[in-house]
Amino acid sequence: PAMVSGVVPLQEIDPTLFESRFLRKIRELGEGHYGKVELCMYDPHGDQTGQLVAVKSLKSESEGPENSNLRKEINTMRELYHQNIVKYKGICNEEGGMTIKLIMEYLPAGSLKEYLPKNKAQTSQHRLLHYAVQICQGMDYLGSQNYIHRDLAARNVLVENETLVKIGDFGLTKSIEDNADYYTVKEEQDSPVYWYAPECLIHRKFYKASDVWSFGVTLYELMTYCDRKSSPPEMFQNMIGRSHGQMTMARLVKALEDGWRLSCPPSCPDMIWVQAPVTPVTQNPSSCV
Ligand SMILES: C=Cc1cc(F)c(CN2CC[C@](CC#N)(n3cc(C(N)=O)c(NC(=O)OC)n3)[C@H](F)C2)cc1O
């Protein structure tokens, strides 16, 4: 056609493809299950006018299953559109597709874990509940797309501004087929056990209702302004004594079965606390935290 019209067709650019040569690492934002997240500037003009982005990549150049974990996470994020879910921006194919990077929007205020302790004075309980509602909205949308998050915690909720929060990481998120109602937990290492519902710890089955349990633990973190001294791991270790290595999981299960629960955060209103009656831990998902 160019020959006929004499006009060279515009180069079709895909805004979701980021070229590695223009991606400049600024600092690390976090380390996780099989990779890391870095703050980068994507600066194609090389004059610092580029945009800041959060980039998730594999720790080692492992071509193993981790790579497919990251590819699955990319396919998940690509399909999610919700005001309370961090925006997918695209991918960066290193060295012709051997390894891939996930490019997301950057929220400089960081997660609730960093934000709440620093901004406690200017964050009312009413605002905490507003954040809680937004987390529910994001999770409700995620569930409606047949995903279970499996790592809902204050550390994975990002602050856009003082009135908007977003679920920011989907490293353990799994799609459950329409007919299935749970995912069988495989990897044991560094599972967020203190946010796990009993059925996940005992039967390694993760339901959408298991995310509701994790939301309850996240609400506890919100109401304590993510105070480290009252974090779920800290409170549990105070109760059973310092870590017992691999015995920790067994002791956690025993404590939960015996009815132990996180205590009511200071000045947390009863209508939030609502200590539901401790139902016996059964095969079915229980979401009474
Ligand atoms: C490979 C797996 C994997 C790797 C990881 F490093 C983590 C842990 N990581 C998650 C992403 C993280 C917290 C959230 N949500 N975050 C995102 C932004 C952003 N988009 O702006 C941001 N901003 C920020 O800190 O600004 C000051 N933090 C933070 F990097 C921790 C989890 C994982 O599954």
Image (spheres, rainbow, N blue to C red):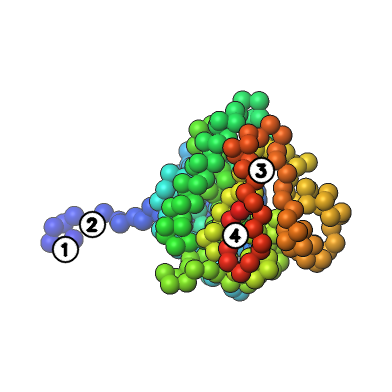
Q: Residue at x 63, y 36 (%)?
A: 270
Q: Which circle's residue, 1 or 3, is located before the other in the chain? A: 1
Residue closest to the far top: 122
Residue 9 — which label? Answer: 2
Disc 2 marks a residue whose amino acid type is: Pro
Whether residue 70 is visible, yes or no, is no
Coordinates of residue 65 in the picture (x, y in percent): 59, 73
Q: Secondary structure at mark 3?
A: helix
Mark 3 and mark 2 in contact? Answer it, CB < 8 Å: no
User: Mark 3 or mark 2, which is nearer to you?
Assistant: 3
Q: Are marks 2 and 1 in contact (CB under 8 Å)?
A: yes
What kind of element bears circle 1?
loop
Residue occupied by mark 4: 286
Of the two numbered discs 1 and 4 on the same chain, state the one appearing first in sequence.
1
Residue 221's mark?
A: 3
Q: Marks 2 and 4: in contact by CB < 8 Å?
A: no
Q: In the structure shown, which secondary structural element does the residue marked by tag 4 occupy?
A: loop
Work out how far the residue at label 2 is from the one at label 1, CA to CA, in angstroms.
8 Å
